[in-house]
Image (cartoon, rainbow, N blue to C red):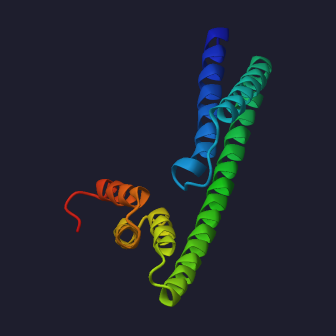
Amino acid sequence: MTLFDILLYCTVFSLAYSWVLVWILERREKKYGQGALSFTDAFLSGAVTLVLVYASSLGLLTRSYRAGITYDVALLTALAGFCLYRESLYRLRAKRMRHRRLAEIRLLNAHIAKDPSNAVYYERLSEVFERLGETGEALEAARMAAKLDPAVRNQWRVRQLEESRPRGSV
């Protein structure tokens, strides 16, 4: 391999490696909705990874082609392991959050049974249903809250949920 080939390979490999790392970290927010990764954190982790992977791959590939490729395979294995670990962690947290939200729904329904004229319970029930992805139930609870307390925020919430529902659903 020529020096140009080594530089090109190290550049592409380190860019792809850094991109996958940032993608794994951003999945927490984008897929599971478990908090946000700020642009600064993502950029910093990607930049540091890019520099370290590029420099170490370049250093090994210029000395020994076989050692450099073995090192890159080891890095990919570690990245795959990190991906599996983070994904299982995200899924576990999502399962726990769903369980907590379902428990909150049961508690709110118990409170509503005791005091059915309290609009605040319906407002919160609407929010919890929306976070669970159940927009039909969220809209129903929001309509009840708006009926009990016709404040602007309740009317706005009903409108917001109606607009976010897929077309053709009741």
Q: Position of residue 70 (x, y in %)?
A: 73, 35
Q: Is residue 169 above or below residue 84?
A: below
Q: Residue at x 76, y 17 (%)?
A: 62
Q: Quadrant of residue 4?
A: top right
Asked whether, in this view, residue 60 is left or right of residue 147, the answer is right
Asked whether, in this view, residue 109 is left or right of residue 19, the answer is left
Asked whether, in this view, residue 56 is left or right of residue 33, the answer is right
Q: Residue at x 64, y 32 (%)?
A: 18
Q: Position of residue 38 (x, y in %)?
A: 64, 37
Q: Nearer the viewer, residue 162 or 1?
A: 162
Q: Nearer the viewer, residue 11 or 113?
A: 113
Dividing the image into 4 quarters, which one contains the C terminus? bottom left
Q: Nearer the viewer, residue 35 or 78?
A: 35
Q: Residue at x 66, y 54 (%)?
A: 86
Q: Position of residue 128 (x, y in %)?
A: 50, 68
Q: Nearer the viewer, residue 26 or 1?
A: 26
Dividing the image into 4 quarters, which one contains the N terminus? top right
Q: Residue at x 39, y 73 (%)?
A: 148
Q: Tell how many labels.
A: 0
Q: Position of residue 159 (x, y in %)?
A: 32, 56
Outermost residue to the bottom:
114
Asked whether, in this view, residue 125 is left or right of residue 66, the answer is left
Q: Is residue 101 above or below residue 6?
A: below
Q: Quadrant of residue 92?
A: bottom right
